[in-house]
Image (tube, coloured by chain):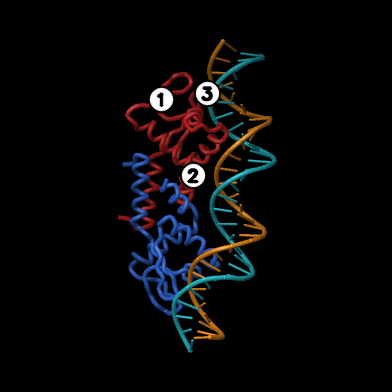
Chain colours: A blue, B red, C cyan, D orange
Amino acid sequence: MDNVKISQALSDPIRYKILMMLVRSETGCCPVISNSDGDSHVGLCNCEIMNELSMIQSRVSYHMKELVETGLVNEEQRGKWKYYFANRKKLLDYVNQVKRDFNLE
Amino acid sequence: MDNVKISQALSDPIRYKILMMLVRSETGCCPVISNSDGDSHVGLCNCEIMNELSMIQSRVSYHMKELVETGLVNEEQRGKWKYYFANRKKLLDYVNQVKRDFNLE
DNA sequence: TGATTATATCAAAAAATATTGATATAATTG
DNA sequence: CAATTATATCAATATTTTTTGATATAATCA
């Protein structure tokens, strides 16, 4: 089922954290991170996540791919950077499905 | 984080299904399963899950342990059977934490 | 009590996931 | 165009999770 896949995506601490970072960068009061151009923006690129979490590049790519494949994250190429955005609609769908599946509320 | 552990527990299709079965047995209009005593009851025991999903016993035990360890399932010994119950409160807490973490609604 | 039934645990194997370093691709810049 | 920067992919390895069969424990039943 779709919800099992999404649970799987959320079951890694790094991915869970990245998703939270994406949400914060999109909904927080002010963007906190800027790329090497000093550009402040919404969404995060691979390299920003990499620096923020001190991870090597291929590891970030791997996890971003996992997130994109479940639909929890959308991506967009902007110049030489690829930016990622949390798909909050998908997350909400997940939450609502969990509620239905387990008869909550 | 606790939510990562719970996501992990939900990330296996068998466990997800078992949890749904438990919920159904507790909240459905009528209990559907009965044990070898012909006893109709709320909650499910190891052997009922085993038969229902055609799984060997140790495999069921393994998954039930995973579920119990995250707190998603409670257990109770009743005679020679051990009955399991979904912890819907825990599931609701999970859902609400996901909402907070990802700024949903 | 001995036999039976239900569940737990363990060690080994299998399968799935994650990490790394190397290399490839792709966009941009000078 | 060559150099640089950002990301993707790949193969090898490591780690984690799952499955299985065997055996142990524990409750009940005759």
Amino acid type, label 2: Asp
Name the residue nearer the viewer: B46 or C14.
C14
> Circle 1 sits on which residue?
B41
Q: Are marks 1 and 2 on the same chain?
A: yes
Characterize the local packing of mark 3: few (<14), some (14-19) or many (20 or more) Cα atoms within 10 angstroms.
few
Q: Chain of mark 2?
A: B
As shown in the figure, which amino acid type bears the numbered disc 3? Lys
Separation of residues labelled 1 and 2 (CA atoms): 26 Å
Instruction: Name the residue located 52 percent from the left edge and 23 percent from the top edge.
Output: B80
Q: Point out the frontmost of discs 1 and 2.
A: 2
The secondary element bearing badge 1 is classed as loop
Residue receiving disc 2: B12
Whichever of callouts 1 and 2 sits on the residue coming sooner in the sequence is 2
Instruction: State which mark lies toward you, 3 or 2.
Output: 2
Secondary structure at numbered mark 3: loop
Q: Is residue A58 left or right of residue A73?
A: right
